[in-house]
Image (spheres, rainbow, N blue to C red):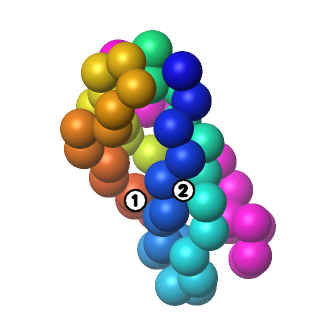
């Protein structure tokens, strides 16, 4: 189940929506900012249908 969460880019400070598959549990992945295109690492702790914690860091 995907849940959409608003995150803020650590590089440019712009907020955008990110869809996270909560059925995967604890996960770490890299995505690019939709505004400045710089990479960031996402660490998410999830339960099905719910994001428990979300951390966004620069690469």
Q: Disc count in the image? A: 2
Q: Say which quarter of the image contains residue 40.
A: bottom right
Q: Say which quarter of the image contains residue 45.
A: top left
Judged from this view, the residue extending furthest toward the left is 52
Residue 5 rendering spot, x and y as whole percentages = 48, 53
- Looking at the rendered structure, which numbered label has been put on residue 15? none
Residue 4 rendering spot, x and y as whole percentages = 55, 47
Q: Marks 2/1: CA distance?
A: 6 Å
Residue at position x 45%, y 46% from top? Answer: 42
Residue 26: say if magenta: yes
Residue 21 rendering spot, x and y as whole percentages = 53, 26
Residue at position x 67%, y 64% from top? Answer: 33
| Residue stretch in magenta | 25-38
Lateral position of residue 6 relative to residue 34, left or right: left
Residue 23 visible? The answer is yes
Residue 30 visible? The answer is no
Return the disc, 2 or 1, that comes first in the chain's sequence. Answer: 2
For numbered disc 2, what is the local secondary structure? strand
Q: Cβ–Cβ below 8 Å for labels 2 and 1?
A: yes
- Residue at label 1? 57
Mark 1 residue crowding within 10 angstroms, few (<14) / some (14–19) / many (20+)? some
Above-or-below relation of 45 to 42:
above
For numbered disc 1, what is the local secondary structure? strand
Residue at position x 52%, y 85% from top? Answer: 13
Residue 48: say if magenta: no
Q: Nearer the viewer, residue 29 or 22?
A: 22
The quadrant the N terminus occupies is: top right
Mark 2 residue crowding within 10 angstroms, few (<14) / some (14–19) / many (20+)? some
Above-or-below relation of 10 to 43:
below
- Residue at label 2? 40
């Amino acid at each position: 189940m995907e849940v959409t969460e608003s995150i803020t880019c650590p590089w440019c400070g712009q907020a955008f929506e990110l869809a996270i598959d909560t059925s995967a549990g604890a996960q770490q992945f890299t995505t690019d900012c939709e505004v400045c295109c710089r990479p960031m690492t996402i660490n998410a702790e999830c339960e099905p249908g719910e994001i428990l914690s979300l951390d966004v860091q620069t690469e």
